[in-house]
Amino acid sequence: MRPAGLDDARLAALAREHGTPLYVYDAPTIRARFAAVSGFDVVRYAQKANPNLTLLALLRNLGASIDAVSAGEIERALAAGFPPERIVFTADLFDRAVLERLARLPIHVNVGSRDMLAQFAAVQPGAEVTLRVNPGFGHGHHHKVTTGGSDSKHGIWHDELAAALDDARAVGLVVVGLHVHVGSGASFERLVGAGEFLVASARQVGDTLRTLSAGGGLPVRYRESDEAFPIERYVRAWREHARAIEAYTRRPVELELEPGRWLVAESGVLVTEVRATKRQGEREFVMVDAGFHNLIRPTMYGSYHEIRALGKRGGERPVLVAGPLCESSDVFTQGPGGTLEPIELPPLSPGDLLAIHDVGAYGASMASNYNSQPLAAEVLVDGGHSYVIRRRQRFDELFAAERDLR
């Protein structure tokens, strides 16, 4: 989708000022997406979608809490001003760096494997925990992002929930929450169905239960033809789940949501410069200076992102948009399985600019230095102002941590 504050002229001016490739984020879009899920008691941003410190601070000021999945993400959240009490660590294992931090910080943990319980009790004796349960089914926009079912590594298998509760009690931990996450870009029916599963599971926890987490995975509209997600119906459905549990626990249940892409995806645009055009048999390629080192979703999942030419209209014809990397898969216009899917663009020449939309989630956060490409700059636009929130990486920084043993 196209953020209202990022029109062609604004994006072109930012590209001239800061160079390309360039990530540009629209702050009002993030605020609007956060407001849409404010019916939940706690909105916990899944920062893996985009962990830029400025975006974390923006969401913190809106009232968000934070979800961390690594020691590095814990440190980012702290650096962005989140107190430990507003951070939850969610994972299916503890590495040693995480356990070292949990030993000295009062961070709540969402446990995805039974082996984690004794390990956590050793560093936070008597702590409260949440259990992430795999309900036995999942759904997502691609099988690689389906996080429920027997093919997924995530969560405690539903048949082992009673055993996990026994494990927790045996090591002195108190289970206060249940969490479920079936996949990224899941359907409304699967997302709500996961809540029905938690309601049925809640009786096993008993009267210590006070938190119900809907996880994340809310889909966004990458194509104009995609139906808008019925967010108000979704909030009402989960409210009903919470009331069903409160009816027999006879205590309030706090309802949590853990959105990532929902909050930031549509805010982001990747601006890239055309550097060459070429015809390869019957195919016409537009070669740009951004590649899968800036946005890997098309290469990894066959994901669609709207691409448009800035300031040019008319004479559209089918083209493929490809990047500079030494990989045949470095093509933005492809579908699942790597099938090439041309899009309609006007005639283009070196120096023209393209905008790739909906890159606020899993663009910069999954970027790499492949082919020794520097990480691109990031800019936040807020009304009439723009701010560099990450400068472009310098060439000397590509190898600053390396050692030459010659």
Image (cartoon, rainbow, N blue to C red):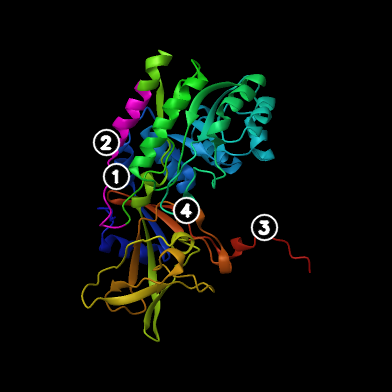
Residue flagged by tag 3: what amino acid is it?
Ala
Label 1's element? loop
- Compared across the picture, whether 291 is left or right of 16 comes to right
Viewer can see residue 51: no
Circle nearer the N terminus (2, 4): 4
Along the viewing direction, whichever of 48 and 163 lies nearer the viewer: 163
Overall secondary structure of the magenta section: helix
* Residue named by callout 2: 232
Residue 21 is one of the magenta-drawn residues = no
Circle nearer the N terminus (3, 2): 2
Residue 352 place in picture, x, y as percent: 33, 74
Along the viewing direction, whichever of 361 and 216 lies nearer the viewer: 216
Callout 3 crowding tier (Cα within 10 Å): few <14, some 14–19, many ≥20? few
Along the viewing direction, whichever of 98 and 317 lies nearer the viewer: 317
Label ID, residue 401: 3
Q: Are marks 4 and 3 in contact (CB under 8 Å)?
A: no
Callout 2 crowding tier (Cα within 10 Å): few <14, some 14–19, many ≥20? few
Q: Nearer the viewer, mark 3 or mark 2?
A: 2
- Compared across the picture, whether 312 is left or right of 286 comes to left
- Compared across the picture, whether 144 is left or right of 35 comes to right
Identify which residue is drawn at 30% across, 58% down.
Answer: 223
* Residue named by callout 1: 229
Circle nearer the N terminus (1, 3): 1
Identify which residue is drawn at 49% across, 37% down.
Answer: 67
* Residue named by callout 4: 143
Residue lying furthest top: 250
Q: Nearer the viewer, mark 4 or mark 1?
A: 4
Q: Which residues are magenta?
A: 223-243
Query: How far, Cα to Cα, is label 2 from label 4?
Result: 27 Å
Label 4's element? helix
